[in-house]
Image (cartoon, rainbow, N blue to C red):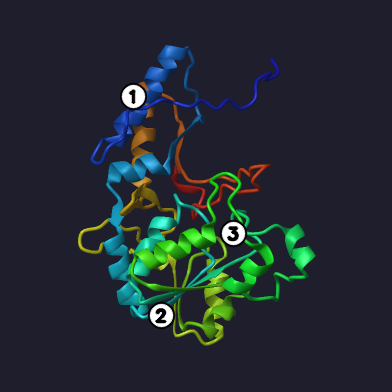
């Protein structure tokens, strides 16, 4: 008979995940209990996907702003640091920025415009056109930005991220200077030690900065690649993919998950005789049609998979 049903996606409810939990057992039991409850069967090549968040929680992969500050200071010198191309997010970047600023005397914050890497708008293209500003070449300081565009609040959160990030830096004890530019080398007029915070374009940004005479160039993927005073870490991605845990800490992207996906696959085969595939996933590529924001803040889509 011709197949009549396409791909089916089911959300499986699990218990609250805590540090140290046996996540493989929880995933397997939750899937099998859901199948029994809802009357569906697992089939060969079905896919079981676990969000990176619950894996990092089970791993206990957390870090404080003090750990971030200590690593930033050690690697970037603790004086004036250029912090460029961060995304505008209270959940994704604000706590990281607290730690970064705590590890410096001055932060020169360079924001891309009209929007950040994932689509959060600082100013609309229409307003740029009206002001005669070319985002590919023009550089603005904070005074010029305010003169032309005033206060711009995020459509969902109501936050003016220029003010919010400036306040976070000052509250952490550092001096702050804000500029708006899209060419990475522009930061070198203000700071020679640079932390680039873009996600998917970071390799290009680093290459341009190094070519143009930066003294030290690091990305978020170079911060907390090893534990600092017992903190969590991520050897591959550092601070990339982290999320706010508390006002003073972040949950990092999960560390190696290969053993987990293989264990879940093996347990399902043992209990059902079915050969499923298993993955730990990060952000996909959904774009919100109203806010124009891409869900692309994680450094990779699949952390580990069978």
Q: Foreground: 269 or 110?
A: 110
Residue that appears at 55% across and 47% down:
158
As measured in the structure, the alpha-carbon distance from the residue carrying label 1 to the one carrying label 3 is 39 Å
Question: Would residue 63 be found to the left or right of residue 282 on screen?
Answer: left
Q: Nearer the viewer, mark 3 or mark 2?
A: 2
User: For the point 47% across and 22% down, which residue is it?
Assistant: 42
Q: CA distance from mark 2 to mark 1?
A: 52 Å
Is residue 236 visible from the viewing direction of this image?
A: no
Q: Which residue is mark 2?
A: 80
As drawn, the label of residue 222 is none
Distance from Cα at disc 3 to Cα at disc 2: 24 Å
Which class describes the residues within 10 Å of circle 2: few (<14), some (14-19), or many (20+)?
many
Q: Is residue 200 left or right of residue 260?
A: right
Between 179 and 302, the residue placed more toward the observer is 179
Query: Relative to residue 303, is residue 23 drawn left or right?
Result: left
Quarter placement of the C terminus: top left
Of labels 1 and 3, earlier in sequence is 1
For the point 60% across and 59% down, the residue is: 151
Instruction: Give the crowd class for mark 1: few <14, some 14-19, many >=20 residues within 10 Å.
Output: some
Which mark is nearer the camera, 1 or 3? 3
């Amino acid at each position: 008979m011709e197949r009549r049903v396409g791909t089916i996606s089911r959300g499986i409810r699990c218990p609250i995940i805590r540090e140290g939990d046996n996540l493989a057992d929880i995933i397997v039991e939750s899937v099998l209990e859901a199948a029994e409850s809802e009357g569906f069967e697992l089939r060969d090549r079905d896919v079981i996907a676990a969000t990176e968040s619950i894996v990092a929680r089970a791993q206990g992969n957390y870090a404080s702003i003090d750990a971030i500050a200590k690593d930033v200071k050690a690697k970037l010198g603790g004086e004036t640091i250029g912090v460029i191309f961060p995304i505008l997010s209270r959940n994704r970047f604000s706590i990281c920025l607290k730690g970064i600023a705590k590890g410096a005397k001055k932060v020169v914050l360079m924001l891309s415009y009209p929007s950040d890497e994932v689509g959060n708008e600082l100013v609309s293209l229409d307003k740029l056109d009206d002001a005669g500003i070319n985002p590919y070449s023009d550089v603005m300081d904070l005074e010029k930005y305010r003169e032309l565009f005033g206060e711009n609040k995020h459509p969902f959160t109501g936050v003016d991220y220029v003010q919010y990030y400036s306040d976070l830096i000052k509250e952490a004890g550092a001096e702050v200077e804000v500029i708006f530019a899209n060419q990475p080398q522009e930061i070198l007029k203000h700071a020679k030690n640079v932390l680039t915070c873009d996600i998917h374009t970071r390799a290009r940004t680093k290459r341009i900065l190094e070519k143009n005479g930066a003294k030290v160039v690091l990305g978020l993927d170079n911060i907390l690649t090893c534990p600092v005073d017992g903190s969590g870490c991520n050897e591959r991605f550092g601070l990339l993919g982290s999320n706010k845990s508390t006002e003073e800490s972040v949950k990092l992207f999960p560390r190696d998950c290969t053993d987990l996906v293989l264990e879940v696959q093996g347990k399902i085969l043992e209990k059902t005789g079915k050969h499923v595939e298993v993955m730990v996933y990060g952000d996909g590529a959904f774009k919100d049609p109203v806010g124009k924001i891409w869900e692309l803040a994680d450094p990779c889509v699949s952390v580990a998979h069978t």
